[in-house]
Image: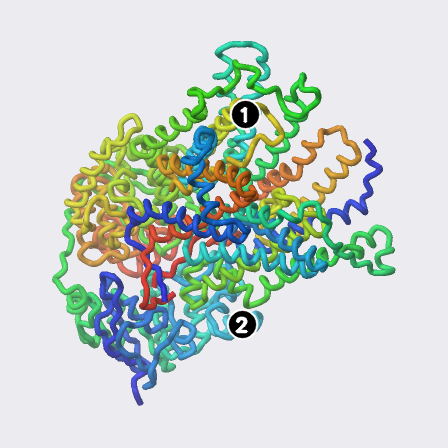
């Protein structure tokens, strides 16, 4: 008989080991899934995890790595702050879209003005868009005690329709011969989020992601706000006793995560995606949830997890073209990763005892 | 715009169809939450049910077998959630989200070969004579079996929760798992059963979308129906008949906006399409603000981990 | 005829602790048998084994001469063993009849059950309405639900875990009548308590546990309370010393404080008025659930009040939050240690930061000084003799007594001008409790105003200068504690707000 026994303290060793164990288990289970799809599992895993970094076309893929990791990290950092406080913003995808729309709209409004001020203004409005979109569940939670999980998620669907309306209507390229989608920022240098170092994939969004990682690290390691966030998540009553204002915390966490998601959207739409189109968003807002958990809500962990998940996106594309692996397989693979992580996480807080049976 | 093209009778008949997947999923989730478990994976279980049901119905030619497969598929997926949260003591919010993400991926993977196919039709029950009654006939006596099944499920859930011992134990486990444990009830077992019931119901709701309401398979076709079902449970204050009411309200808005789109209303299509989500949010806000009454009905142990230490 | 229940050599070990070590005892028919011991002596583990919640590692149990190995509570109940828990195993959102049905193997139809409940509750003098929600009942009424749940099964042995800790003296008297009636009908009762006078009044035999071992059985009517206390604790107890306070300068004052109930089953505070002088200890008694948590929250600043209702040294502090009050010197230690006074998964250092930031200067411009926090933590650990591997240990890893010493110590070391403590020694062993009480008295001797909210009347009588009682969110006028009789206290706890009647 297997029994679990609560550890007096969470195990530090396991909290480092579990994410790696989860990745390993996912590779095994994923390999089985690929085998079930009739692919060679070893080859599939190699194509996803090895080839993009060290294979023949690595020069192309390596640059892609940062392009995909940037938004994932930026969004996940924001989410992790809320998750630590027990505030569940799961509508980052919506904030990402609205941030992109707001920032892009500001940029397009200035077209064709060539001024250094355009791009910074776009960044500000991108963050603002995401911030305001996230404030909707925030204010509803604070004022009416409405569940922020459901509201933030439902707003994703609203944002998607809003995006469709913008891409097909308001922001449609007037010179686009009636095709859906906005003007492309590649043809508007003042508003284009260009690669800072050519070929690396390093654009301003990646820089923002790194800054967010450092900022969050300091926040949690040294600042009182970080302490209050952790406290509110672990013991809400103790937090109130410690003087934390729950309403303020909700607004702070949702606002910040919304702003970061909005920023990610803006950097994406003005750079790699290039334009507001009906489907420029590819679900980073949801994948970032996996990134946040895989990184154990720790900024450095999120940095690594973001790179890993970016790798699965790129590897997934590679496997799609090389092996004909369906795109959906990667999505399932990512979901599996989260499951394994949650499962093995039990080892951090509990000791497994074999043999002697305790009362269950 | 020609509003006269919208027939109230057909509107109500269509509303019942539109509400059915939500009713099924929401009733399942209601049972899960009454047992004290918050499963945010409804969307994932619904879409998995949608493809399981679709695939089996297409392969076997029998919608009934399809619905059964959908229930099984949903339940199996929910078991994953059950094992993780009940035995591995994982965070319910995170695990539920994971279930949704995984379900969306898995269903897309399973549905590779089924895009663009038409499933066998789910036959309507056409009760002769009664279905001829004007207004009431088309509404009450000319629907498919699943619509009636969903209504029956609501009544059965209400009765079981209110009158049966099983319902009492379920509520007790959701209310205070430590006390239930101290009295000798198997908290984990009760919860696992509730979770699987919820999964089966969500699966059925998904299959109703792919087999009857739409009917075809597209990736991500549930389009938030699972999340709306979750919201409807809160709206319904964990009471079966209010859940039914909420689902009909949602169904009504959906059907009305579709009719307005068809009638060429002077509002952009995208804004009409948003309306069911916005109205769901509005309803959630109204419900949660009158806090005392609704909070009383929320199971006290909702979302809390149970680990028997002694 | 053999004894009702015989326990032989029962042993149960948990990792790091032997909860019961070779415990043997015998309960006769129709006997009220006391199980006596300090917190952590192993009483709970022993009764959990009898009730089938825990399986012994070694030893045997015999019920009516037959081997008795209940695999689960259901089996124990079927064999005639019933139990009333200390922390009630009740469901607040369900009604009385539903709660009772849950504790029965084959409950009758709800309507019949309701009739039976009325009948039995009348017969034993414990009136109860089967259709009321348990969440709306008082602690005493909740206990009745538990007792009637047991009585409906005609138990041979009724286990009662600390039954009087939630009752007023008058309610205790009613309970004892019920128990005596049961005894006269031949039911045996295993009565767990650490209140010696009670045991001497009620029980026919007593078994005393210390550190998991049976250290003796006696007839409590023939032993002195002091002799039993020393058997229980194993040492001579230190009685706190106190000096009468002299100043008459008001520190903290409440003027007609009213507060809505913060939650569905919470208690609203109604027109609470009192003042505490510097150097004075005000004891606030009352049965649990009469507004103790709410009053603590209102004083700590967690539940902000309207302006003009709470004053400290002339400042209107009603609308201030916890940290603003701390800055002025008004500190608090709530009842619930894990999750309220301390965050379970955080280290002691982090828990020191929880309340100590303002007064100990642990942060500058929002940035925390972890080194200073650690030093402060170590001071608390040393001065209050908190047994722990170190400041990095998680709060949940500490025993109840040690964590309580830390929580109280953390506040005292911040040199409060007024300190509010709720249940300062609840679930704490006798020596730690004595140390905490002494520390509170020392603090008062240095001029701090102290409010002790407690359900332990002995404790309140021991350390208070004045006493008041909470009843349904109202507070009686405080009266001098010296010379109060049990009857007077009982009347105050029962809501006799007329001071003269209570005191005269």
Label 1 Cα crowd, 10 Å radius (few <14 / some 14-19 / many 20+): many
Quadrant of the snapshot with the C terminus of chain C: bottom left
Q: Nearer the viewer, residue C280 or C498?
A: C280
Q: Nearer the viewer, residue B166 or A356?
A: A356
Q: Nearer the viewer, residue B73 or C424?
A: B73
For the view shown, which residue lies furthest in the bottom direction? C1
Q: Quick one: SS at disc 2?
A: helix
Q: Nearer the viewer, residue A193 or B20?
A: A193
**Residue C256 appearing in the image:** no
Vertical order, C444 against B81 (above or below): above
**Residue C250 appearing in the image:** yes
Q: Chain of mark 1?
A: A
**Residue at which label 2 appears:** C113
User: How far is disc 2 from disc 1 in space, using C-alphas?
Assistant: 67 Å
Q: Residue at x 36, y 69 (%)?
A: C53
In the rendered structure, find residue A269 and report the number of the disc placed on it. 1
Label 2 Cα crowd, 10 Å radius (few <14 / some 14-19 / many 20+): some
Q: Quick one: SS at disc 1?
A: helix
Q: Residue at x 38, y 70 (%)?
A: C83
Q: Residue B250 sits in which quadrant?
A: top right
For the view shown, which residue lies furthest in the left direction? C236
Q: Chain of mark 2?
A: C
Vertical order, B22 against C235 (above or below): above
Estimate the x, y position of residue B24 in percent, counting from the top left: 64, 54
Same subunit: marks 2 and 1? no
Vertical order, C189 against C326 (above or below): below
Vertical order, C286 against C191 (above or below): above
Estimate the x, y position of residue B189 in percent, counting from the top left: 48, 64
Left-right relation of C247 to A177: left
Estimate the x, y position of residue A3 in percent, counting from the top left: 35, 62
């Amino acid at each position: 008989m297997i029994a679990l026994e609560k550890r007096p303290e969470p195990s530090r060793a396991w909290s480092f080991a579990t994410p790696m164990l989860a990745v390993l288990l996912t590779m095994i289970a994923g390999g089985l899934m690929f085998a079930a799809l009739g692919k060679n599992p070893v080859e599939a895993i190699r194509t996803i995890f090895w080839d993009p970094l060290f294979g023949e076309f690595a020069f192309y893929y390596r640059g892609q790595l940062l392009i995909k990791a940037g938004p994932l990290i930026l969004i996940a950092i924001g989410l992790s702050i809320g998750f630590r406080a027990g505030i569940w913003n799961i509508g980052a995808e919506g904030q990402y879209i609205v941030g992109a729309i707001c920032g892009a709209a500001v940029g397009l409004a200035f077209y064709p003005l060539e001024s250094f001020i355009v791009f910074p203004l776009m960044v500000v409005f991108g963050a603002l868009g995401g911030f305001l979109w996230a404030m909707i569940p925030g204010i509803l939670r604070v004022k009416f005690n409405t569940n922020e999980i459901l509201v933030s998620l439902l707003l994703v669907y609203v944002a998607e329709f809003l995006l469709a309306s913008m891409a097909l209507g308001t922001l449609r390229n007037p010179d686009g011969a009636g095709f859906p989608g906005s003007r492309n920022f590649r043809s508007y240098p003042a508003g284009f989020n260009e690669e800072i170092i050519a070929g690396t994939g390093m654009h301003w969004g990646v820089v923002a992601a790194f800054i967010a990682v450092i900022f969050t690290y300091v926040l949690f390691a040294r600042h009182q706000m970080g302490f209050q966030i952790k406290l509110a998540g672990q013991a809400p009553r103790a937090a109130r006793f410690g003087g934390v204002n729950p309403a303020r915390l909700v607004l702070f966490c949702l606002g910040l995560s919304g702003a970061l998601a909005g920023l990610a959207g803006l950097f994406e739409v003005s750079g790699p995606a290039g334009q507001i189109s009906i489907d420029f968003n590819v679900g980073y807002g949801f994948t970032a949830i996996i990134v946040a958990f895989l990184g154990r809500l720790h900024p450095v962990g999120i940095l690594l997890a973001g790179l890993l998940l970016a790798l699965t996106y790129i590897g997934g594309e590679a496997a799609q073209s090389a092996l004909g692996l369906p795109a959906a397989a990667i999505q399932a693979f990512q979901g599996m990763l989260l499951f394994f992580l949650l499962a093995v996480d039990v080892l951090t807080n509990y000791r497994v005892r074999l043999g002697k049976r305790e009362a269950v | 715009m020609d509003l006269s093209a919208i027939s109230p009778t057909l509107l109500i008949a269509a509303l019942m169809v539109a509400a059915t997947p939500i009713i099924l999923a929401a009733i399942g989730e209601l049972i899960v939450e009454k047992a004290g478990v918050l499963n945010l994976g409804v969307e994932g279980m619904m879409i998995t049910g949608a493809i399981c049901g679709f695939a089996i119905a297409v392969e076997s030619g029998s919608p009934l077998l399809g619905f059964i497969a959908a229930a099984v598929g949903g339940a199996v997926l929910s078991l994953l959630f059950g094992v993780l949260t009940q035995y591995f003591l994982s965070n319910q919010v995170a695990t539920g989200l994971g279930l949704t993400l995984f379900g969306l991926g898995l269903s897309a993977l399973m549905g590779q070969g089924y895009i663009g196919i038409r499933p066998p039709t789910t036959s309507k029950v056409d009760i002769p004579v009664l279905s001829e009654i004007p207004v009431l006939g088309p509404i009450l006596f000319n629907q498919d079996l699943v619509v009636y099944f969903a209504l029956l499920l609501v009544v059965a859930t209400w009765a079981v929760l209110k009158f049966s011992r099983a319902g009492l134990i379920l509520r007790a486990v959701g209310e205070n798992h430590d006390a239930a444990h101290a009295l000798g009830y198997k908290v984990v077992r009760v919860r696992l059963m509730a979770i699987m019931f919820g999964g089966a119901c969500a699966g059925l709701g998904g299959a109703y979308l792919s087999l009857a309401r739409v009917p075809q398979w597209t990736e991500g076709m549930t389009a938030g129906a699972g999340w709306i079902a979750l919201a409807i449970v809160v709206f319904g204050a964990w009471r079966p008949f209010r859940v039914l009411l909420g689902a009909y309200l949602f169904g009504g808005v959906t059907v009305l906006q579709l009719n307005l789109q068809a009638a060429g209303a002077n509002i952009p299509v995208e804004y009409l399409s948003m309306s069911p989500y916005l109205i769901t949010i509005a309803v959630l806000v109204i419900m949660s603000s009158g806090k005392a009454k609704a909070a009383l009905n929320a199971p006290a142990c909702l979302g809390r981990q149970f680990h028997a230490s002694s | 005829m053999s004894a009702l229940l015989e326990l032989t050599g029962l042993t149960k070990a948990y990792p790091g602790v032997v909860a019961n070590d070779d415990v043997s005892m015998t309960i006769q028919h129709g006997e009220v048998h006391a199980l006596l011991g300090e917190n952590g002596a192993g009483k709970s583990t022993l009764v959990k084994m009898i009730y089938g919640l825990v399986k012994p590692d070694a030893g045997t149990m015999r019920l009516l001469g037959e081997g008795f190995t209940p695999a689960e509570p259901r089996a124990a109940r079927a064999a005639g063993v019933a139990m009333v828990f200390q922390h009630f195993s009740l469901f607040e959102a369900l009604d009385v009849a539903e709660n009772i049905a849950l504790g029965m193997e084959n409950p009758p139809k709800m309507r019949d059950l309701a009739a039976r409940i009325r009948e039995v509750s009348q017969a034993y003098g414990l009136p109860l309405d089967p259709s009321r929600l348990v969440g709306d009942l008082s602690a005493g009424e909740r206990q009745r639900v538990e007792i009637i749940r047991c009585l409906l099964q005609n138990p041979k042995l009724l286990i009662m875990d600390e039954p009087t800790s939630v009752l007023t003296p008058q309610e205790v008297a009613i309970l004892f009548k019920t128990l005596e009636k049961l005894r006269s009908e031949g039911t045996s009762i295993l009565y767990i308590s650490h209140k010696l006078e009670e045991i001497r009044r009620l029980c026919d035999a007593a078994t005393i546990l210390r550190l998991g071992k049976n250290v003796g059985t006696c007839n409590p009517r023939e032993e002195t309370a002091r002799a039993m206390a020393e058997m229980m604790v194993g040492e001579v107890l230190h009685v706190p010393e106190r000096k009468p306070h002299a100043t008459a300068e008001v520190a903290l004052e409440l003027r007609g404080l009213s507060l809505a109930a913060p939650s569905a089953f919470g208690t609203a505070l109604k027109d609470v008025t009192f003042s505490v002088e510097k150097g004075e200890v005000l004891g606030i008694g009352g049965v649990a659930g009469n507004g103790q948590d709410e009053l603590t929250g209102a004083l700590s600043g967690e539940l902000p009040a309207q302006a003009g209702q709470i004053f400290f040294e002339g400042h209107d502090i009603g609308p201030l939050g916890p940290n603003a009050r701390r800055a002025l010197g008004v500190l608090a230690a709530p009842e619930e240690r894990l999750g309220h006074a301390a965050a379970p998964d955080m280290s002691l250092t982090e828990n020191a930061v929880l309340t100590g930031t303002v007064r100990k200067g642990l942060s500058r411009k929002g940035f925390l000084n972890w080194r200073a926090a650690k030093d402060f933590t170590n001071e608390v650990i040393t001065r209050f003799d908190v047994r722990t591997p170190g400041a990095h240990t998680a709060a949940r890893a500490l025993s109840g007594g040690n964590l309580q010493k830390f929580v109280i110590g953390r506040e005292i070391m911040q040199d409060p001008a007024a300190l509010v403590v709720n249940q300062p020694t609840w679930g704490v062993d006798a020596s730690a409790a004595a140390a905490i009480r002494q520390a509170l008295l020392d603090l008062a001797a240095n001029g701090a105003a102290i409010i002790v909210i407690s359900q332990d009347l002995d404790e309140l009588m021991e350390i208070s200068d004045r006493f008041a009682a909470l009843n349904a969110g109202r507070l009686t006028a405080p009266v001098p504690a010296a010379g109060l009789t049990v009857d007077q206290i009982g009347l105050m706890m029962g809501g006799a707000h007329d001071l003269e009647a209570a005191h005269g």
